[in-house]
Image: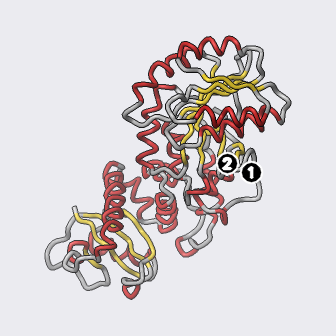
């Protein structure tokens, strides 16, 4: 098996070079526009894998073998980028080899499909998910019409919209009163989100609100919430043990909305939260939202979501949308966990910077705002 880059002024020409040299079974790994240093080789670089040809069969072309490029070492400041790019290419290659040859070939040698596939993976959508999305779409145009075609815009957005699961509500419908708990890692913004929820879904709706905090680990954490509660004129109570939380919930049954703040614990401190998780899980009427920063790296999102699985969250709530350029990891995590997204938060303004999650905002953060349609797609409820 051999990985090689082919350069040409069009993706189609680069693919034809690959098929001539590596054979018709060669598979696409990645495609992108070339940078300044390699611009003279062609406008596009297409990375393809295939069986090594027999010696002497290679003809002259404008391709460049990865191994051949190793002779000139890259600059030190580009080393980490090159390693990251190689890792992504190998992940895509592993997926390619796992798929059926005919299935992946339909994407590899369709310039429009490969362009859409690259768009999704560049947005940090899971590679396997990107393959499934692209493979379900029938290309409506020829390869010469790929630029600004409906395939990479409206049809791709519509296919992604089918996978989106949103549920921007608070509380469990079967519960006698609404109880919402926010769990998540340190610095995720749980306290800020709690105050925003109290204003939007409590005070603005003329509901009675009670805030319970179990965060006795951070210095002055309770004092911050106590100050907010005093300003807003809502109830506040510090709960120091999981057993005390159960009693406090019984005392708050007359309230319209109860919001529970929990401590943000590092991976080495999560054993402390096991008792709290058991108490929350014992009350079927508690709506648990896992609060995560949208700016967190994909690998960290997976790890943290797994660590907080002990709380059995029913929804995902994402903060810091103003600090990230793509929402691909957000959608990928929602699909992987089979959990709907409830709210988006960006910024510190209270309560303006909290809003129900929407399909348009989520997909706009993956495909770009310029592909956003005028009509809104429906939401798939959990």
Question: Is the Cβ of the residue at disc 1 closer than 8 Å to that at disc 2?
Answer: yes
Extreme-right residue of the structure: 206
Give x and y (percent) for residue 288: 59, 28
Q: For residue 359, which numbered disc appears in the image? A: 2
Return the disc, 1 or 2, that comes first in the chain's sequence: 2
Q: Nearer the viewer, residue 171 or 10?
A: 171
User: Does residue 95 lie above or below 252 as drawn?
Assistant: below
Residue at left 81%, top 33%? 203
Residue under pointer 1: 376
Residue 83: x and y in percent read 30, 64
> How many numbered tags mark residues here?
2
Badge 1 marks a residue whose secondary structure is loop
Task: Give whichever of 189, 338 is nearer the camera.
Answer: 189
Judge whether 357 appears above or below 137 on screen: above
Quarter occupied by residue 177: top right
Give the percent coordinates (x, y) of residue 35. Answer: 42, 79
What residue lies at 52% left-to-right and 32% top-to-bottom?
263
Residue, x 42% and y 33% (percent of image)?
307
Residue 326 falls in image quadrant: bottom right
Q: Residue lying at the far bottom in this picture: please name it.
A: 40
Q: Quadrant of the C terminus?
A: top right
Task: State the residue at coordinates (27%, 76%).
Answer: 74
- Of the pair 365 and 300, the residue shown nearer to us: 300
Provide the secondary structure element on which disc 2 rests.
helix
- Image coordinates of residue 275 in percent, x first then y, are 47, 18
Q: Quadrant of residue 76?
A: bottom left
């Amino acid at each position: 098996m051999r990985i090689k880059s082919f350069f040409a002024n069009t993706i189609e020409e680069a693919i034809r070079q690959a098929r001539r040299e590596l054979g018709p079974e060669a598979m696409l790994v990645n495609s992108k526009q070339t940078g300044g240093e390699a611009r003279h080789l062609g406008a596009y670089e297409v990375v393809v894998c295939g069986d090594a040809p027999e010696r002497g069969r290679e003809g002259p072309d404008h391709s460049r073998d990865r191994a051949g490029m190793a002779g000139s070492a890259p600059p030190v400041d580009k080393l980490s980028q090159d390693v990251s790019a190689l890792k992504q290419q190998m992940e895509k290659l592993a997926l390619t080899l796992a798929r059926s040859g005919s299935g992946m070939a339909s994407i590899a040698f369709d310039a429009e499909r490969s362009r859409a596939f690259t768009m999704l993976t560049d947005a940090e959508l899971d590679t396997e998910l990107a393959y499934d999305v692209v493979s379900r779409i029938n290309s409506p145009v020829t390869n010469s019409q790929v630029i600004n075609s409906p395939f990479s815009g409206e049809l791709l957005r519509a296919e992604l919209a089918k996978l989106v699961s949103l549920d921007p509500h608070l509380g469990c419908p079967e519960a006698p009163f609404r109880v919402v708990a926010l769990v998540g890692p340190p610095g995720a913004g749980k306290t800020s989100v709690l105050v925003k929820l109290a204003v939007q879904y409590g005070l603005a709706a003329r509901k009675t609100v009670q805030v319970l905090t179990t965060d006795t680990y951070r210095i002055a954490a309770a004092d911050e919430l106590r100050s907010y509660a005093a300003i807003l004129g809502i109830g506040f109570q510090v709960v120091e043990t999981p057993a005390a939380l159960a009693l406090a919930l019984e005392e708050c049954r007359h309230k319209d909305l109860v919001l529970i703040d929990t401590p943000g614990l590092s991976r080495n401190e999560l054993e402390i939260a096991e008792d709290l998780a058991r108490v929350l899980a014992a009350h079927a009427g508690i709506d648990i939202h896992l609060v995560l920063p949208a700016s967190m790296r994909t690998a960290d999102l997976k790890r943290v979501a797994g660590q907080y699985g002990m709380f059995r969250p029913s929804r995902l709530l994402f903060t810091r949308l103003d600090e990230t350029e793509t929402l691909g990891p957000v959608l990928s995590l929602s699909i992987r966990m089979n959990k709907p997204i409830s709210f988006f938060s960006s910024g510190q303004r209270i309560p303006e910077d909290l809003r129900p999650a929407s399909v348009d905002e989520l997909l706009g953060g993956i495909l770009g705002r310029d592909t956003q349609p005028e009509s809104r797609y429906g939401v798939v409820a959990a």
